[in-house]
Image (tube, rainbow, N blue to C red):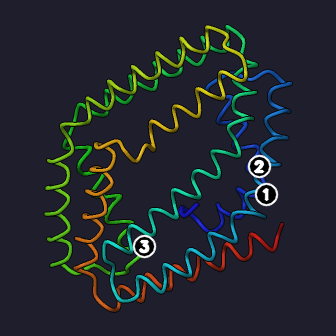
Amino acid sequence: MLSSCNTTKIFYNYGEIFISWQVDNYFDLTSEQEEWLKEKSILLLDWHRKEELPGYKKFLIEIKEIASGGLDMNDLDYSFSIFETKRDRIFEKITPDIATFLDSLSVEQINFLEKKMLEDNEELYERMKDKEVILEKRKENFFEQMETWFGEISKNQVARLDELQNQWYKKSSHLSKNRLDLRLKSQNQFITFLRSKPGKTSIENWLRQWTFRIVNSSDRKRVNRILRNKKRILEVDKILTHDQRIHAIKELDIWIKVIEETIENY
């Protein structure tokens, strides 16, 4: 949502077209499936605009108050918990429809999905080969986000952020291949499951179990990864100036206004 003010407004009015196009890219939809998906997407977007966006507005207002004087771990724990609650609400809302859609797939569409996954994986493996290019791209995106939210970054801050980026990348880059291998394994399991024609109820149960594995709070690796990311946020927060915090608050004000206008257009 935070990619563009105009994009956000457009998506809530015409998002069913984008969703349909994206899903068709992976499943080669029939005309009946395409119409069904558009209808369900309109209902979902209407629900999200009416029921969820007011909560997002409230959350951003809270973040403004929290972040104005700097962040600590308690602030991040609270923010992450709010995010997880909102994520879970969305998943709970869409799971039955996802299960219905997956149950409608033909053998040809499952084969189409498998082929598309293989193509995507090949592209990922190719991109992962040149780690220096990946690092530079990450840095480029990171600094663009920093300037968007905090304004001008000093030379000393750039040097420190560059140093942090190098440290973070070295600590996490060795996991990249393992993640890709896990991705491939999960995809193969998913395709095998769909080919077994399990039925809507079994698919819905599978989706819930899959989500639980991803968000499981007892998963030590996941807990450590989230803690690591929180510590990185705090490292960045330490070097921000008062003016940069004010700049971020003004950016939040813009997004609060975008959400208000999006709700009003419902």
What residue would you read off at disc 3? 148
Nearer to me, 153 or 91: 91
Question: Could you say which quadrant of the image residue 120 lies in?
Answer: top left
Q: Are marks 2 and 3 in contact (CB under 8 Å)?
A: no
Nearer to me, 89 or 50: 89
Please, what is the three-letter code of the amino acid marked with disc 2? Leu
Rendered position, 113 above or below 258? above
Please, what is the three-letter code of the amino acid marked with disc 1? Asn
Rendered position, 261 above or below 13? below
| Disc 2 from disc 3: Cα separation | 30 Å
From the viewer's perspective, tell me whether residue 3 is left or right of residue 32. Answer: left
Q: Nearer the viewer, mark 1 or mark 2?
A: 2
Residue 123 — which label? none
How many discs appear? 3
Q: Residues within 10 Å of mark 1 (few under 14, many from 20)?
A: some
Please, what is the three-letter code of the amino acid marked with disc 3? Thr
**Residue situated furthest front in the rendering:** 218
Q: Residues within 10 Å of mark 3 (few under 14, many from 20)?
A: few
Residue 243 location, x and y as percent?
35, 91
| Disc 1 from disc 2: Cα separation | 12 Å
What residue would you read off at disc 2? 44
What residue would you read off at disc 1? 13
Residue at 22 percent across and 35 percent down: it is 130
Residue 119 location, x and y as percent?
46, 21
Residue 167 location, x and y as percent?
14, 56
Mark 3 or mark 1, earlier in chain: 1
